[in-house]
Image: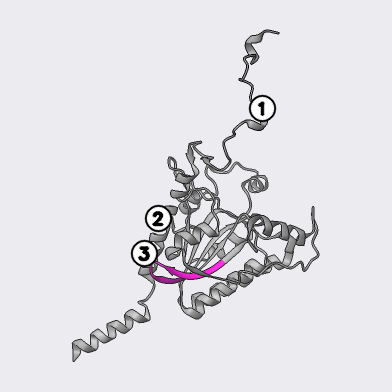
Amino acid sequence: MMPWFKRVEKGIITPTEEKKETPDGLWFKCPDCKTVTSMTEHRKNLRTCVKCNYHDRIGSKEYFAILFDDNKFTEMDEEMSSGDPLDFVDSKPYPQRTAETQRKTGLKDAVRTAYGKSGGRDITIACMDFAYIGGSMGSVVGEKIARAIDHARKHRTPFMMISKSGGARMMEAGFSLMQMAKTSAKLALLSEEKLPYISLLTDPTTGGVTASYAMLGDFNIAEPGALIGFAGPRVIKETIGKDLPKGFQSAEFVLEHGFLDFIVDRKELKQRLVDLLAMIMPASEESNGTAKVQKVAKSS
């Protein structure tokens, strides 16, 4: 054995337990352009790549912080949790999967709903979390969204839905599919009362969520590069027996084919939302009252 590839000098060999490893979570490597940046810088950039602008997935915590003024909001139905009406078991019982997911994510289900102010305007927002069983739509998701819409109707606020989902939750079968009709019916009531509904589609928005409330917005908008569709590309390709176009089901492809109104960068999201609402919402009761006072004073 030659000594040139062996550490024979005294003091060079470091015991395993004394080796210093770089802590996890300090760096972000962009899946698209492979640029490495610190997590601190990545968070400052709202979890978008500093080089190619790739939009990393974020959850309700981050979206609420972006959209609500000073991150102040009131959450609704935060303790609502799924039951097990079908006694469903796959690799494990559904209640066990629910408990484990709640413990791991700190979430009660795949959507959070809240109200507060954005740009000084009252707004009600529902935001899905992909970390909770793939953002799947179960009975709790449908019920919380329905209640959030009711809140928007009662308090005359615009409603915003941020979708991020793999589709319906198989553990709830028909109960899950019923949420498509329930949420769509509630949105119809919102429309009848002339209250705006803004639907933001993020990566990924698929399945029954795409087939219901995600595509029913007065304004359907999306983040750059988001996967948007019903069935997956592989399933579609096998069904039609043809190769799919380049960029199929990307937000840019969906926009080009008329299913989106515009694509918005996450760093511009709040300002675009505020500008949009300023154009389509009537003046508040307070400003109306001020205008009336000024009109009376002028006439007198």
Judge by depth and name the residue closer to the eye, 290 or 283.
290
What are the residue bounds of the magenta stretch?
113-123
Task: Locate residue 82, reporting x and y percent.
Answer: 70, 67
Instruction: Using the numbered discs, state the Cα–Cα distance from disc 1 to disc 3 in whole angstroms.
Output: 60 Å
Q: Which residue: 63% across, 16% down?
A: 10
First along the sequence among labels 1 and 3: 1
Instruction: Using the numbered discs, state the Cα–Cα distance from disc 2 to disc 3 in whole angstroms.
Output: 11 Å
Tell me, yes or no, if residue 260 can be seen here. yes
Is 17 rendered above or below residue 212?
above
The image quarter in which residue 165 lies: bottom right
Task: Locate residue 24, reporting x and y percent.
Answer: 58, 41
Q: Amino acid at mark 3?
A: Asp
Q: To which residue does mark 1 refer?
A: 15
Q: Residues within 10 Å of mark 1 (few under 14, many from 20)?
A: few
Judge by depth and name the residue closer to the eye, 72 or 63.
72
The N terminus, quarter of image: top right
Q: Reply yes or no: does residue 117 show up in magenta.
A: yes
- Element type where label 2 sits in the image: helix
> How many numbered marks have been drawn onto this rendered protein structure?
3
Q: To which residue does mark 2 refer?
A: 268
Q: To which residue does mark 3 refer?
A: 275
Is 169 on the left or on the right of 41, as rendered?
right
Q: Amino acid at mark 2?
A: Glu
Q: Which residue: 24% across, 86% down?
A: 295
First along the sequence among labels 1 and 2: 1
Instruction: Using the numbered discs, state the Cα–Cα distance from disc 1 to disc 2 in whole angstroms.
Output: 50 Å
The image quarter in which residue 238 lies: top right
- Element type where label 1 sits in the image: loop
Q: Amino acid at mark 1?
A: Pro
Judge by depth and name the residue closer to the eye, 275 or 68.
68
Is 114 rendered above or below residue 136?
below
Mark 1 or 2: in front is 1
